[in-house]
Image: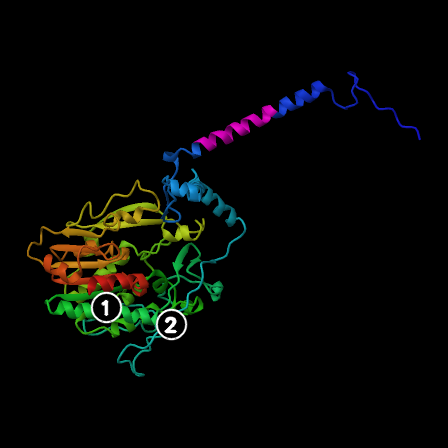
Amino acid sequence: MNKAPAQKTDNGTKSGQTRREKREELSRRRRLAAPFFLIMGTLMVIAFIIPLRPTRSYSEKRALAAFPDFSVETLISGEYFDGISAWYSDTFPGREWWIRAASAMDALHGFSDVTIYGELGTADAIPSPPGYTESTENPETPKPTPEATAPPTPEVAETSPPTESVEHWGGIDAGEDAEVIFGTVLQIGDSAFAYYGFSQYNADRYVGMVNACADIMAEKDIQVYDVLIPTSVGVLVSSDDMEKIKCSDQGASISYMFGAMNDNVCKVNIFNTLIAHNDEYLYFRTDHHWTALGAYYGYEQFCAVAGFEPVPLEDYGALEFPGFKGSYYWSCNQNSRLREDTVYAYEGNTFPWPVLTDMSGADSSAKYMTFLGGDHPLTVITNEDLPAADNCVLIKDSFGNPFAPYLSQHYHNVYIIDYRSYSAMTLRHFVDYYEVDAVIFAESLAMAQGDGTLDLLEWFCA
């Protein structure tokens, strides 16, 4: 069989491409690749410049990995280079932007009215309060009320609200999709909420801690108040929808805990009051805290129990800090359907700056720090206009921050202790040293049933 003769090029080669053409093609590819490798090299150099790398993730609310300290031991074991690898991947410049971009891409896949983040907890059944009989309103099935009930006295714990009025209800409608089981954080429309589950064991621990503290303070002639602050899901989501999303009823939880407390504890039940105002801006949509308005209604109820005349809200000057994106915004992967919040603060004659801090230029996730400048082990507000008034100590988590300034309208010194970080002395020594006349507990209902919370409070209040 005859073979077809190979086609020769003008330089005598059998290739379909001349050597010159090959060199030109290779040169062209190098020219095209050079900018890419130059950019990659520049980015690599920039990425290793430590001062340019972020040290904290606002989206994840945590400190990022630090560059490891060198030692011979970590070098030999390999931990040093593992640390560099963790630091490099955790603190790459522009990391927050990439997280936002990823969230935006996820949002293109579709959305529903209700979105689940996390895993469902297991709640205990809520017992009836001590002294409950069949003739009383069943606290396990509370219903919102169109009007606030009378304020609780120190001796009597209010039960949950009575009959629900559909016309009045101003909270959130979870819709048909609420029939699914939700997790730690759930999103309904443009708002996010946290799952709440009642813990019988920890509720009893909290009650025992408060009762023991009240007995100790009674020997010193110091009054103890307890303000259990509901979270947004318990106030804004209707009773029927709370059952759909497998959340425990917060009104019943508070009734049980207050019903088990001793008579020497002044119980400030703010649940009914907040229900009556749940068509107002009581809680943030993108954050787990209540607003300064919600805290004001809690303050009004405290005054009713403590015997004070509350300062009307219209007597305060309003401060406004828009563009707030709180903890839920990041928990929900920065979902674009969540509506940005505005932080409102109410400035009184006796607590201007720095009790309320100007956060207009702060990062969008930090604006809640307008209240007391954030969480600190000990903060003191002194009202020089009330030199003869009593002193109080507020034992709080971050829910107490917008609540604390209102107390300065009635006390000379308001000592504000964040039990999560204060360790200078125990409460019984603190009240003696600072001549305290009243002890006020103000924590979110969820935090009051946390193991870590109770460990710290039991130590501090022993």
Quarter holding residue 183: bottom left
Q: Residue furthest right?
A: 1
Residue 149 seen anywhere in this rendered image of the structure: no
Q: How is the image coloured?
A: rainbow
Quarter holding residue 311: bottom left
* Mark 2 neighbour density, 10 Å: few (under 14) some (14–19) many (20 or more): few
- Between residues 391 and 283, which one lies in front from this camera angle? 391
The region drawn magenta spans 30-45
Question: Which label was assigned to residue 124?
Answer: 2
> Which amino acid type corresponds to the residue marked 2 in the rendered image?
Asp
Residue 273 seen anywhere in this rendered image of the structure: yes
Which residue is pictured at 16% across the width and 72% down the height?
264
Residue 425 spot, x, y in % from top left: 17, 57
Mark 2 element type: loop
Mark 1 element type: helix
Left or right of 24 on screen, residue 234: left
Which residue is pictured at 47% across the width and 33% down the height?
44
For the image shown, how many numbered marks are present on the structure? 2
Residue 239 spot, x, y in % from top left: 38, 69
Which of the two discs, 2 and 1, labels the residue nearer the N terminus? 2
* Mark 1 neighbour density, 10 Å: few (under 14) some (14–19) many (20 or more): some
Q: Is residue 341 magenta?
A: no
Q: What residue did someone put label 1 on?
A: 209
Quarter holding residue 203: bottom left
Q: Residue furthest left?
A: 388
In three-dimensional space, the C-alpha distance between marks 2 and 1, rounded to whole angstroms, equals: 20 Å
> Which amino acid type corresponds to the residue marked 1 in the rendered image?
Met
